[in-house]
Image (cartoon, rainbow, N blue to C red):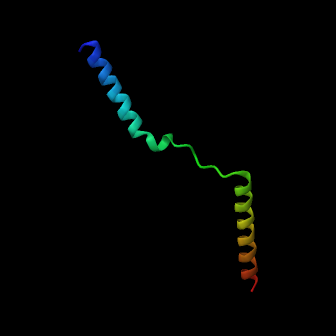
Amino acid sequence: MNSKDLEARAQAMLDEALEETFPASDPIAAPTFDEALEIVKARQAQEATTRESAKK
């Protein structure tokens, strides 16, 4: 193979690898502090409701 063929093959392999890993290249969706605080509050409220229901 000549140099241009090798370069084209390498580029094709890189392109394929990028396509195969695309979803993993997306950034994670981490909640902000305020969002995380709301999640914690909601879970605590749900747990309190569950405890109150269990007492009845």
In the rendered view, tell whether residue 30 sits above or below residue 4. below
Query: Farthest top residue?
Result: 2
Image point (29%, 18%), residue name? 6
Count the numbered circles shown.
0
Image point (71%, 56%), residue name? 36
Dividing the picture into quadrants, the one containing residue 11 is: top left
Image point (43%, 39%), residue name? 21
Dividing the picture into quadrants, the one containing residue 22 is: top left
Q: Is 32 situated left or right of 27 in this image?
A: right
Dividing the image into 4 quarters, which one contains the C terminus? Answer: bottom right
Q: Nearer the viewer, residue 50 or 42?
A: 42
Image spot of residue 25 (x, y percent): 50, 40
Dividing the image into 4 quarters, which one contains the N terminus? Answer: top left
Image spot of residue 50 (x, y percent): 71, 76
Image spot of residue 51 (x, y percent): 74, 76
Image spot of residue 23 (x, y percent): 46, 44
In the rendered view, tell whether residue 54 sits above or below residue 32. below
In the rendered view, tell whether residue 43 sits above or below residue 19. below
Query: Farthest left residue?
Result: 1
Query: Farthest bottom residue?
Result: 56
